[in-house]
Amino acid sequence: MPRFRGSYSTSDLSRKSGKIIAEALRHPVIITQRKKPRLVLLNIEDYQRLMKQSDRRAVSTIETMSDELFAEFESAVGTYAGDDETPHRSS
């Protein structure tokens, strides 16, 4: 995996924790293990924002979801149904 801005190995984490934490306060940082991404370190505000977005989708029912979310749901179902109606060619 190529190294890019905001990516550190687990051994970097043990040697450069202060620098990595300071960077993670500015933007998410990827922690790799054996050259594969394994973790993301991010500031608490980003984490809370992600959790809030996640919760909004997880707890909604059709009766209680917002008009905006229902429109997204309806569009996704329409797209999915349209895929089923498209004739598939056999190979």
Image (cartoon, grey):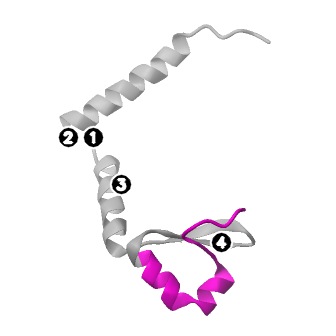
**Which one is closest to the eye, mark 4 or mark 2?**
4
Instruction: Quote the CA–CA distance across marks 1 and 4.
Output: 37 Å
Please say if 15 is above or below 23: below
Dots 4, 2 in contact, CB < 8 A: no
x then y, percent, for residue 34? 75, 72
Of the two numbered discs 1 and 4 in the rendering, the one whose residue sits closer to the viewer:
4
Helix, strand or loop at disc 2?
loop
Residue at 64% x, 84% y is 12
- Which quarter of the rendered picture does the C terminus lie within? top right
For image coordinates 28% across by 51% down, the residue present is 56
In three-dimensional space, the C-alpha distance between marks 3 and 1, rounded to whole angstroms, equals 14 Å
1 and 2 marks in contact (CB < 8 Å): yes
Q: Nearer the viewer, mark 4 or mark 3?
A: 4
Residue 80 at x, y percent in the picture = 48, 23
Which residue bears the numbered disc 3? Answer: 54
CB under 8 Å between discs 4 and 3: no
Residue 77 numbered tag: none
Q: Is residue 8 magenta?
A: yes
Mark 2 or mark 3: whose residue is earlier in sequence? 3
- Amino acid carrying label 4: it is Thr
Marks 4 and 3 sit apart, C-alpha to C-alpha, by: 25 Å
Per the rendering, the mark at residue 64 is 2
- The single residue placed furthest to the right in the displayed view is 91
Mark-to-mark CA distance, 4 and 2: 40 Å
Which residue is label 1 attached to? 61
Mark before the other along the chain sequence, 4 or 3: 4
Instruction: Write the start and end of the magenta stretch as one range.
Output: 1-24
Question: Tag 3: residue type?
Answer: Ser
- List x then y, in percent, for residue 60: 27, 44
Residue position for label 4: 32
- From the viewer's side, name the closer residue of 51 and 25: 25
